[in-house]
Image (tube, rainbow, N blue to C red):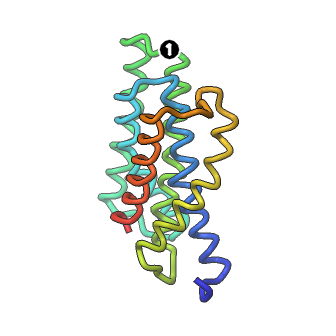
Amino acid sequence: LNRMNKKQWALIFAQAICAGALFNLLMLFGLHFTTASIAGVITSALPAVIIIFSVILLKERLSLNKTLCLIFATIGLLVINIRGVTLSGHGLMGLFGDLIILLALIPEGLYYVFNKMKTKRLPPILLAFILNLINAIVIIPFLFISPAIHMHFSLLETNVLLVSGLSSALFYLFWI
């Protein structure tokens, strides 16, 4: 850890904030206004978001396959939202939720691009620990802000938090 420079620490911090805090906060907020099924379809546009950021930040070339991916993802999102408003009564609040879910893809896509940018590799267990530690520090204040979260957790709620924390750590570990 001592051999890491400021740029590498900034990338690790950006990864943690993007994939952990921002993505989850935006996703949970967006789900208050739209359905989980529509959110699931919208998040399938993540590869297109990664392609866009890879072209912009990593100067990758836009191949025919990547271009087709962007076109189909865009058409799919348009069809879902137009059809959702006209046929299912999705409404303006549903569109707002869809937009928030779409915005959640930005930090998630940036996480993958930032992961490609790292120059020195840390052991996966250490990196997973660091990412989760940063996420915990960033997310804890939201426990005090959100009226939906109670400060006194039942045994079940405590176990759910522990399991979700463990699964988050395992996500980073297995992904890396």
Q: Position of residue 22 (x, y in %)?
A: 58, 48
Which residue appears at 46% of the width and 81% of the height? 121
Q: Quadrant of the C terminus?
A: bottom left
> In front here: 13 or 73?
13
Residue at x 55%, y 19% (from the top left corner): 93
Q: Position of residue 61 (x, y in %)?
A: 42, 68
| Residue with the most extreme bottom position | 3
Residue 6 percent coordinates (x, y): 67, 78
Outermost residue, left side: 65
Q: How many marks?
A: 1
For residue 95, above or below residue 60: above
Q: Name the residue tied to disc 1.
A: 91
- Give 145 or 122, whichever is nearer the viewer: 145
> Looking at the image, which residue is at 45% across and 51% down?
165
- Asked whether, in this view, residue 53 is left or right of residue 61, the answer is right
Q: Quadrant of the N terminus?
A: bottom right
Label 1 CA crowd tier, 10 Å (few <14, some 14–19, many 20+): some
Vertical relation: 167 (above or below) 148: below
- In this rendering, the answer to whether 53 lies above or below 92 is below
> Viewed as shown, does residue 2 lie left or right of 154?
right
Image position, residue 47 (x, y; %): 38, 53
Nearest to the observer: residue 152 or residue 163: 152
Which residue, as the protein is rendered here, is positioned at the far front?
155
**Residue at (57%, 49%) from the top-left corner?**
21
Q: Amino acid at mark 1?
A: Gly
- Judge by depth and name the residue closer to the eye, 129 or 11: 129
Q: Tag 1's secondary structure?
A: helix
